[in-house]
Each structure stands twice: as structure tokens, then as C-alpha cells.
Amino acid sequence: MDGNRRFAKANKIPTKEGHLKGFQSLINMLEWCLELDIKAITVYAFSIDNYKRPQEEVVTLMEMAKEKIAELSFKK
């Protein structure tokens, strides 16, 4: 999950919206994995360097991740 902020900037949308679109892409990929009966995957979503971002952005990302992971856990 890389480039969501750059995507948002290039498309002149809020950073949060770029991250939401990135999460939706991840959800789509995970659903395909389920359909293909893939039992395990690895998702690299947040590096240590990302903690250098503004605190508000980090908190927003962590809350968004928590929310989306919770949504996924109830899907199937």
C-alpha cells in the first residue's frame, strides 16, 4: 500500500480520500484472494518512516486501518 498520498495530490483530492481509495483497493484484492482460496497473504502497509509524518495524519491512518480491518473481519 504505497502511493496513496501521491495519488491524492496528483488527483487534487484530500489525502484522506487517497488513503480510503487505497484501502478499497486492498479490500478488493483480499476479496479476490478469498475467491481463489488463497490461505495466507502479507500486506505491507505502514513503514517506520511514516511515523515522521504529521501526528494528525498518522492518527487518521491508524484509525482508518483499525476501522477497515474491523469491517473486513465481519464480512465473512
Image (tube, grey):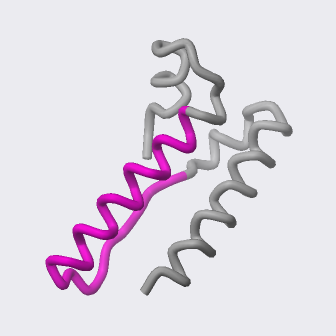
Q: Residue at x 55, y 12 (%)?
A: 12
Please give left or right for residue 46 compared with residue 35 in the image: right
Q: Which residues are magenta?
A: 18-45
Q: Is residue 38 above or below residue 59?
A: below
74 is within the stretch colored magenta: no
Please give left or right for residue 4 compared with residue 59 in the image: left
Please give left or right for residue 74 compared with residue 66 in the image: left
Please give left or right for residue 21 compared with residue 58 in the image: left
- How far from the left and from the top, in percent, is residue 26? 40, 56
Q: Is residue 64 above or below residue 72?
A: above
Near-viewer residue (24 or 44) = 24
Q: Is residue 46 above or below residue 71?
A: above
- How far from the left and from the top, in percent, is residue 1? 43, 46
Near-viewer residue (48 or 28) = 28
Q: Is residue 31 above or below residue 8?
A: below
In the picture as drawn, the residue positioned furthest to the front comes out as 75
In the picture as drawn, the residue positioned furthest to the right comes out as 55
